[in-house]
Image: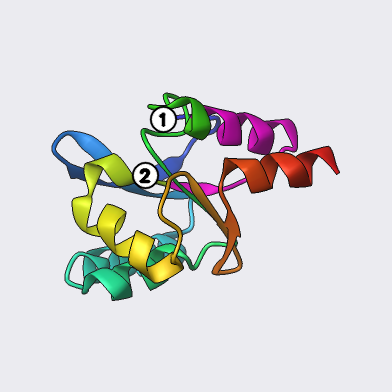
Amino acid sequence: LDVESVPTFLLLRFNKGDIVEEKRLIGAKPAELTRMTEEFVKSVRMSTDERIKKLLEPSIVLFLTGNRTTPKCKFSRAIVEVLDKEDIEFEYVNVLADDDIRQGLKKYSNWPTYPQLFSGGTLVGGVDVVRELHET
């Protein structure tokens, strides 16, 4: 789970044994932990579009197959490698573990394939776009 310091608080949501959402708080910050936990619980009760909007709140979010440390396809692996090379911190969502998000995001973003990278709530693109940005 890539815990590098303690205390680190992880809020994880699972679907069929896979992590579909992760929130992380590093350090002892009781007020922030309370806020983060309350928001996390509320997200469980939201519609798919509301959940997608909530998932897009962090500055950079990658929707991929698998997770950051074990991507499930070469395209997801390639985009993670580019982001890691650039030392870009990002949240991720495993679309294989949540069919509602997997299908809903395709409609929401009007982008039919995964991975999908968002910055500031706006679709950047897939692996080809990210590779091109990395090269330039």
Please state the horizontal and vertical placement of residue 50, each as a whole percent of the image. 31, 75
Does the CB distance between marks 1 and 2 fall below 8 Å? yes
Badge 2: residue crowd in 10 Å (few <14, some 14–19, many ≥20): some
x 75%, y 43%: residue: 132
Q: Outermost residue toward the left?
A: 16
Task: Give the CA distance from mark 1 to mark 2.
Answer: 9 Å
Task: State the SS at label 2.
Answer: strand
Q: Amino acid at mark 2?
A: Leu
Residue 7 placement, left or right of 102? right
Please state the horizontal and vertical placement of residue 53, each as a whole percent of the image. 40, 72
The one nearer the camera, 6 or 69, is 69
x 61%, y 68%: residue: 120
- Depicted 105 relative to depicted 108: above or below: above
Location of the C terminus by quadrant is top right
Please state the horizontal and vertical placement of residue 25, each as a whole percent of the image. 47, 50
Q: Outermost residue toward the right?
A: 136
* Residue on which disc 2 sits: 10
* Residue on which disc 1 sits: 1
What span is colored magenta in the figure? 77-92
Badge 1: residue crowd in 10 Å (few <14, some 14–19, many ≥20): few
Please state the horizontal and vertical placement of residue 77, each as a whole percent of the image. 52, 28
Q: Which badge, 1 or 2, comes first in the chain's sequence?
A: 1
